[in-house]
Image: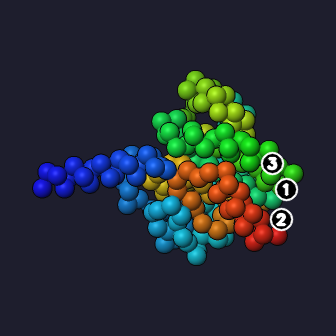
Amino acid sequence: MKKWSLGLALACVLLLFAGACGTGQDETAGAIGEGSSQGSESESEGSSQEKIFGEFETVTLTGEPVTQEIFGEAKLTMVNIWATYCSPCIQEMPELAELAREYEDRGVQIIGLLSDVSEPEDATAMEIVEETGADYMHILPSAELQMNLLSRISAVPTTVFLDQEGNMTGSAYAGARSKEDWSGILEEILGEVGA
C-alpha cells in the first residue's frame, strides 16, 4: 500500500512539473467554460462566446490603470495566467515575449495575469519579467478577476484567448507550451476569427 501511495504522489509531482503548477485551490473548483475538463486543453463548446473576465478595474504590474476595454485594442488577446512560484510559467515567458512581438502586426496582444501578486511593483514579479524579457503587459488580479476568473482555474499557467469584445474564443489551455505550439494555436484561432 505504501509503495502505491508513494508512486501516486511521485506521479502527481511529475505532472505538475511537466507543464503546470497547482494553484492551491480545490481541483474540483469550476473550470473556465461550461463543461471544461482539466487537462492540457480544456474542451468547451459553450465557452466560445463567454465573457470570462466580465467588467473589471485593475492595475498593471507597474501601476497603470486597466479595464476590460484593453481587449478592444487588438483583434485577438492571448491572456497567460501565471504565478511567481511556477517554473513552467517562467520558462515559457521568453518565447511568449517573442510571440508578442511577432504577432503584434497581425492584431494580437499578449497579456500576463499574475495569479499570486496583488500589489504593483512586486519585487519578485518585476525581477521575473525583467529576467525573462517578457515585456508585454502584466496585470494584477482585482477582486472581480479573483471572483470571476481565477477562482475557476486550478493550475497555472492557464491561457485563454479573447476577441475584441472580451469574449473567449475557443478553449482554455492548461500548462506551458513551446513557441511553435503557441504559434500553431494562434494561427488556428486567427483563421477562425478572420484576422
Task: Tell which residue pokes out farthest to the left in this image.
Answer: 1
Query: In the rendered image, which residue does mark 3 sit on?
Result: 102
State the image coordinates of residue 194 (x, y, percent, origin top left).
Answer: 82, 70
Q: Residue drawn 85% across and 56% down? A: 106
**Which element is circle 2 on?**
loop
Q: Nearer the viewer, mark 3 or mark 2?
A: 3
Task: Tell which residue pokes out farthest to the right in this image.
Answer: 105
Query: Marks 1 and 2, how far apart in space?
Result: 7 Å
Q: Amino acid at mark 2?
A: Ala
Is residue 65 depicted above or below 39 in this figure?
above
State the image coordinates of residue 53 (x, y, percent, origin top left).
Answer: 62, 56
State the image coordinates of residue 182 (x, y, percent, origin top left).
Answer: 66, 56
160 on left or right of 39: right
Q: Quadrant of the N terminus?
A: bottom left
Query: In the rendered image, which residue does mark 2 sit on?
Result: 195
Q: Nearer the viewer, residue 149 or 20?
A: 20
* Colour pattern: rainbow
151 on left or right of 138: left
Query: In the rendered image, which residue does mark 1 sit on?
Result: 106
Residue density around tag 2, few if under 14, some if 14–19, many if 20 or more, within 10 Å: few
